[in-house]
Amino acid sequence: MREFNTSGPNNPDIHFTVMRETLLQKAEEQITRPADPKGGRYFTLYAPRQTGKTTFVEQLMKRLDRQQFFPALISVESLSGLEEFDFYAGLGNRLDRMGNFPFAIPAMSRRRDFENFLSALKTQLPQKLCLIIDEFDGVTGPYLGELLHLFRLIYHARGQKYNLHSLILIGVRNLTEINLEHASPFNTNDEIRLSSFTRAETLDLMGQYEAESGQLFAPEVKERIYYETQGQPGLVNALCKRMVEDLNPGLDKIIGPELANEAVERFIRVEISKNVSNILDKAREEEEHIIELFNTGAKIEFHIDTEWQKFLWVHGVIDVDDAGGKEKYIKFSCPLYQKKLYFFFKPQIDEMRYYVPLEVSYKSFLFPDGALNLLALLQAYQAYVNRRGKKAFAHARKRKDGRYVEAAYHYSLDTFLSAAMLRLGGRCDVEFPTGNGKVDIFLLHRGRKYILEVKNFVDEDQISDAKEQAVRYAVSEGLREAYLVVFSEVHPRETLTASFEENLENTAVKSVLINVNFARVASPKKRRTSPRKAPAKRRRAGR
């Protein structure tokens, strides 16, 4: 039986494989172009890492008629940063070792050598050369501009002096995003962005396992895997591999939701994945902006010309939320990445000894029947913040204006509730229902779920909308009560113990205001009634 692949290109003979027929057909048409007598197109194929670029190219090469076309796939990954002589020497070496040419490739040391090689192929190679260069966006030497100019020159003369029918440059970035300070952009190319699996492709991949093993995934498991990964190929394969190889209850049993939960939790909290490690590395470079994305207020508009947004989008950390309207907003690429980033940037908060007074037992937050009294627990958090003031957020990152980033409040509340649930035999976790940074906290205690909406106060209209949203969320979960925690930087310090209970659409909504308005109030200066300095004493004569 084949298997889910998490390392290297897919081999359809031994790995479950999604055949991206529409994109493959588009790429094949770019190469063959029978209506163009000069030859095929030069284009870029780009996508974040572990999206299946190499697998896609290998599938593409198999579709080409080898009597007519000669596809040569090479990688220049290790040639980044070399001097011109070493770069072209390495390029020639890779053409010789990896290109599978029927003859030896001459030594190269400069651009002219590479140009002469492509010219000689006009007579040496009967097929049309389709050159595919992987990791091309990593080439950084000053000779890059000259190399792209050469490709441009050959493109306009292809079929005449040179044999380079088609050229595919593969990388994380599109070629037009490479900064060429002293060269004109290579503007003769088209582009193909290799996206994540669609829902149908994700289900198809999982269906291949079902057909060969006879074991089924529960329908909700298939939906969960697509939801958590949004079809990111590396993640889909990794989670499926974990469920069927390490957590499998037996081929005669259905893979149910509890296994999916365990696979996701282990992926977020325990495992070290190449895929996720790369995402964390890129996110670390834009840590300040990532933290700002965990903001429950206004969405952040997406603009590809904003450098930090383009960087994170190119590397697959964020995506564009196209959900209606002309406006485009930022969202995290998938919930699994968002959860991983939330915990990755969560600071170590050593405040547990201050959470409740020594004379208070955590059991006081339980009703007589043992059920959780969440309102009392939230009021205890309110009292903790009131006692500790700024010290409760000593861990927090601040904005340039000196205010705390909103994520600091979420992390503080999350840590407090996690500590309480640990004492009470429950569990605290977070959900990201929209992908654009919104954080919901939920608690599990004695088989019962409690949900909390967390907001940073803007105005009363926003709070009214938040209550309605909390009610909809509660109803969707079959609950009769919802909780709203509002952090406010604008309410006066006298408002320290505010909490409210109301009934909306037969749902109890319980709200707690956490006052984080720590602005120092200046005391009025007293008018001086005495001179700043006492008059100097006159020195006695004779001293």
Image: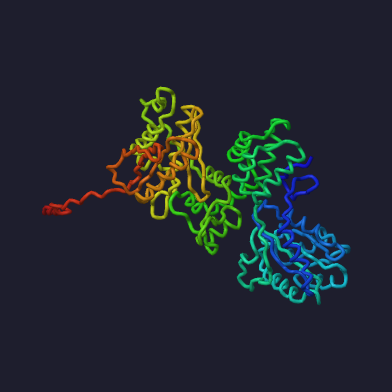
Q: Position of residue 164 (x, y in %)?
A: 79, 69
In the rendered image, the residue lying farthest to the front is 505
> Is the residue 307 above or below the residue 377 in the image?
below
**Is residue 66 in sight in this rendering?**
yes
Please state which of residues 466 and 393 is positioned toward the viewer in this rendering: 466
Tell me: 286 left or right of 21: left
The answer to which quarter of the image holds residue 47 is: bottom right
Task: Find residue 373 and report its horizontal and vertical position in percent.
Answer: 40, 30
**35 to the left or right of 51:** right
Residue positioned 78% across, 59% down in the render: 73
Q: Nearer the viewer, residue 164 or 532?
A: 164
Percent across and percent down for residue 534 are 15, 52
> Which residue is drawn at the image coordinates 55% and 62% (left, top)?
304
Please, which residue is most extreme toward the left here? 541
Here the colouring is: rainbow
Confirm whether residue 543 shows in the render: no
Rendered location of residue 137, percent (x, y): 67, 61
Q: Is residue 78 above or below residue 32?
A: above
Residue 118 occupies quadrant = bottom right
- Residue in the image at 72% along x and 36% along y: 215
Q: Residue 516: name its quadrant.
A: top left
